[in-house]
Image: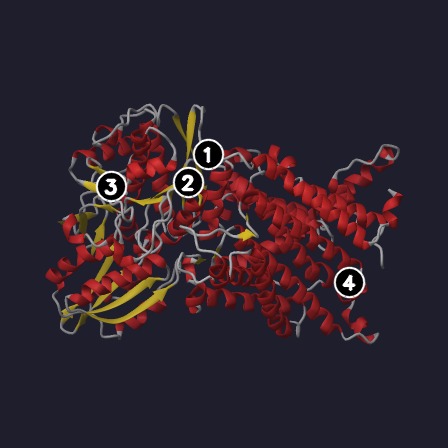
Amino acid sequence: MKKINVNDTTLFLSFAAVILLMPIWLSPFGAAYPDLLQKFAIYGIFAIGFNILFGLTGYLSFGHAAFLGVGSYAAVWSFKLFTMNVLPAVAFGIFFAGLLALAIGFLSLRRSGIYFSILTLAFAQMSYNLAYSVLTPITNGETGLQLTSNDPRWIDAMYKTPEAGLPSTELFGLTMNGYPGFYFCAVILIICFYISLRIFRSPFGLTLRGIKTNQKRMKYTGFNTRPYMLAAFVISGMYAGLAGSLLAITDPLAGAERMQWTASGEVVLMTILGGVGTLVGPMLGAGLIKYFENIFSSFNSGTLHEVFSFLPDGLEVVVVKVTGLFVGSGWHLTLGLLFMIVVIFLPGGIVEGVQKLARLFRPKTDDDPQAPAPQKQAAE
Amino acid sequence: MTDFTKFDRRQVLKFGAAGAATLGAAPLIFSKNAWAETFRNDPGSKKSVTLGFNVPQTGAYADEGADELRAYKLAVKHLNGEGDGGMLNTFTPSTLKGNGILGKKVEFTTGDTQTKSDAARASAKRMIEKDGALMITGGSSSGVAVAVQGLCQESGIIFMAGLTHSNDTTGKDKRRYGFRHFFNAYMSGAALGPVLKKEYGTERRAYHLTADYTWGWTQEESMRKFTEEMGWETVAAVKTPVGAGDFSQYITPVLNSGADVLILNHYGKDMINSLTQAVQFGLRDKQVNGKNFEIVVPLFSRLMAQGAGDNIKGILGSTNWNWSLQDEGSKAFVKSFGAEYGNPPSMAAHTCYVQTLLYANACEQAGTFYPPEVIKSLEGFKFDGMGNGPTEYRAEDHQCFKDVLVVRGKQEPSSQFDLLEVVEVTPRAQVEYDAKIFGGELGPYKV
């Protein structure tokens, strides 16, 4: 496995191109502004990491938000204590998330299936409550951990005199908000994608798939599956920590709500929506959900009613009311419907839908030059 | 394409990195000078300006958020010269002409803060980066206000805080680009203290239930400061999570704590729930230490009173403004709000409406939208006719100073909106404090 094959090379290069060109091709959708682009990249990393666990081993973790939160807190503390440079923040975020993943994974992986999911959920909820009220000196509770002008910032203090006002996060002088922040996240996303690609193609990935298919048989053939599982769990926890630290880098604030179970559920949705176990699926799902959250939620109730006017009057009111009771804002409804459609008709997620479409048109377009649409490369 | 098969990993990485670097750098070159000469979201020669209204539409403070949004829409109407003009007619000194701001039509974009810092910042960022909002206002939680205010300072966008009562907003977390018209927890304590002393005496044992975030903390701190100064004893202070819903586990211990006053540092739906449950547990019918058990809600609003129903009767609290005030500004505002929406405005609506007008007027006075100039014209600005009597935006901490109302839940309301009676109007001098006591610094004009 020294070389990645042609398909993977083109897949990787076109993935990189699509990500880096997002500011251009997303502008017709009203999504080409730095904050949302950063979120696309960051949650893409989160979902890709989650997919390494869920997609390859089939172990459904309901507690990944805990790692995201820990990554954020670690990054903000790095900004507060050491330096505004983002590289230490990233390192701390990954390290502490990995540590927590090791602890939680070690305990949770003693069980499988639903018991594993419940254990991870319980641990994540514990982390959330710790961050929310018990560990207030470290996390600043509901208010969220923020930078202040009297933070020590020891390393920065050695090299330069602080300017007036709060410093912003930087990479050797390049401030990390706006487009530079996006490109930083995008480059990391592409690296993460590459690592994920290599894991999928490696013997390690194959072992994980073996565990998913039949863990008992793997054990009979002499594999001790536990270390492999734990490694996958920690790797995916570190991905989440990385995403968390990037959230703090693009916006130096860490709140406990990042660790809530809804945030854990979100990444599950992203992965399933895009396509479990596929390479680009989680990224698609993450993009779609963040798009809905930011763009659809900015429509007022009038627009929302227009969007759903295809439903019969009574039903529309009922559906809006019912979902409103559970989640509160209208965009969840749209997302819920989409999710139901995907799960019922396309269990393989959006990627499966694209493949089905491609198969439908293949006989006719065989002689045509291959269209460079990125989704079509998702041959997984 | 076959050439790719000869590439090994190193080459792929090398080309990938080079490509990434070029692609990454290209847009930087284009955008580099975009804001160099001018300021963020400069309307330039555009015919309109956009304001961002960032309010909670879901969560524990959603009722306040909905009312705030109504007030903002009304303010935009009045600024654009539609409707009856409301406080535009009573606001002095004002240079507002009812033709928008500096001749540009006022437009707006809205967002849902979800009463969460993360969501609020994401929504504010969307307004700034996508919708080109020149000013952000709103928030019905101090945690959110502090978070969004920090963001606005970094982005060079003025933030006119809506309903936020924590001392931190204009105290240790104050920012050059953030302004607050609403009063704060310290002023509530200073105004309530003497009234509590008069009503309940100096020998009381107080039990605090406190919303666990910046507002609750400073509210509790201020209430303890003023009640302990006059001789009250604090039995316990328990923090409760925001949006808890069920407070029974926190109220049961109050019964046997030996306390005879319960101070609820809660707001919005939290306060409605905790007060209702406290009353259901029979706290108000109790006799402790030979005295009637009393409940105090330091921050009160008519919307909350409406939610709490009969339980609010006779309970003391403080408020920024009440619609029953009889000055010209209040009457004009209540009239146009009532004509538009059919019910009187809450204090949240009032402060948001006033903040929008104050921002517009500051732009007119400065003759520009350039934030540092607008900030300078707001700092130290003295005005009247906005419902609170003579008011001043203190330059040192961007906090408005004005009279504070101490109110009580009415025993016999004459209508479903007439729920609060004003017990005392505490003069400004009594609630004023030194800007330095909370620390913090405003930061630079230019960012």
- Determine which residue is flagged by label 4: A205
Of labels 2 and 3, earlier in sequence is: 2
Q: Looking at the rendering, which quadrant does residue A238 occupy?
A: bottom right
Q: Residue at x 72, y 44 (%)?
A: B19
Q: Looking at the rendering, which quadrant does residue A360 occupy?
A: top right
Q: How is the image coloured?
A: secondary structure
Q: Secondary structure at mark 3?
A: loop
Q: Secondary structure at mark 4?
A: helix
**For the residues marked 2 and 3, what is the alpha-carbon distance in whole angstroms?**
19 Å
Of labels 1 and 3, earlier in sequence is: 1
Mark 1 and 3 residues: CB-CB less than 8 Å, in contact? no
Q: Mark 3: which amino acid? A: Gly
Q: Mark 4: which amino acid? A: Gly
- Determine which residue is flagged by label 3: B380
Dot label at residue B157: 2
- Determine which residue is flagged by label 1: B41
